[in-house]
Amino acid sequence: SLRDRQAGQSNFFDLLDGEDQNNGFDLPAPDIPEWDRRLLLKYEKELLGFYVTGHPLNEYKAMIQAYKLTGIRSTKDMPENHGVRVGGMIAALTLKHAKRDGRPFAIINIEDLEASMECLVFPDAYAACAEHIVQDTPVLVEGFVSKRDGEDQRKIFADRIRPLAQLPAHYTKEIHIRIYEENLADDTLAQLKSILKQHPGRSKVIFCVGCAGGQFA
């Protein structure tokens, strides 16, 4: 109003008057680096309650398929006390203490790309793998599927939990490497030898050599 202007006061709409309609609003946006994809997904889940641009398990999808891990949805058709290996995210986590001896245990919600399921981690299992039981962490759960007395919903009773990224290190029995004669060169063999030497392990390495005539040796 005129009285406000005479008193040296202004409001938001006064800033838009005049020849320059920007009045300070045309400042360039700061050049901020993109968030790491995992951090972006984490913030999406915290802010919205769900993922928008993807799912943290997508980078493990090929690994889950290669090692034939059990899908959570398929556990509904399994017999009681059937053993399972499930790869998923810890979508929710509750820590409690047993009434009998006060030892800690965990109730987690494990989520894969298709479904979710409650998982119980009793004191012995929790003591062995507590460091891996962290919110929003991709994990491998080994255990069995069953129902508790008086309950209708099946749960996973965990015997062991470890990071999903450790799956190849613990469950790879053999590594098969195919080498084709037409692409074979001394430097290729030297590189392969160097890679194997840098990553020693207990898994057996088997070479399959494809000869020019079509035979494999």
Image (cartoon, rainbow, N blue to C red):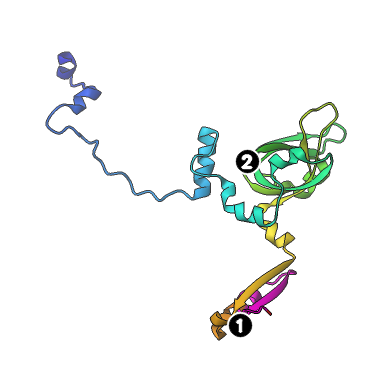
Locate residue 46, reporting x and y percent: 54, 36
Above or below 11: residue 72: below
**Mark 1 belongs to which amino acid?**
Gly
Q: Which residues are magenta?
A: 193-216
Q: Earlier in the sequence, mark 2 or mark 1?
A: 2
Closer to the camera in the image, 187 or 14: 187
Above or below 200: residue 47: above
Q: Is residue 154 left or right of residue 66?
A: right
Q: Residue at x 65, y 38 (%)?
A: 115
Q: Is residue 68 magenta?
A: no
Give SS at disc 1: loop
Q: Which residue is mark 1?
A: 213
Give SS at disc 2: loop
Q: Residue at x 20, y 34 (%)?
A: 22
Closer to the camera in the image, 153 or 122: 153
Name the image quarter holding residue 16: top left
User: How dense is the environment of label 1, judged by Cα within 10 Å: few (below 14), some, or many (20 and up)?
Assistant: few
Closer to the camera in the image, 11 or 71: 71
Q: Quadrant of the C terminus?
A: bottom right
Q: Is residue 90 left or right of residue 183?
A: right
**Mark 2 belongs to which amino acid?**
Glu
Q: Residue at x 18, y 15 (%)?
A: 1
Observer able to see residue 46: yes
Above or below 195: residue 67: above
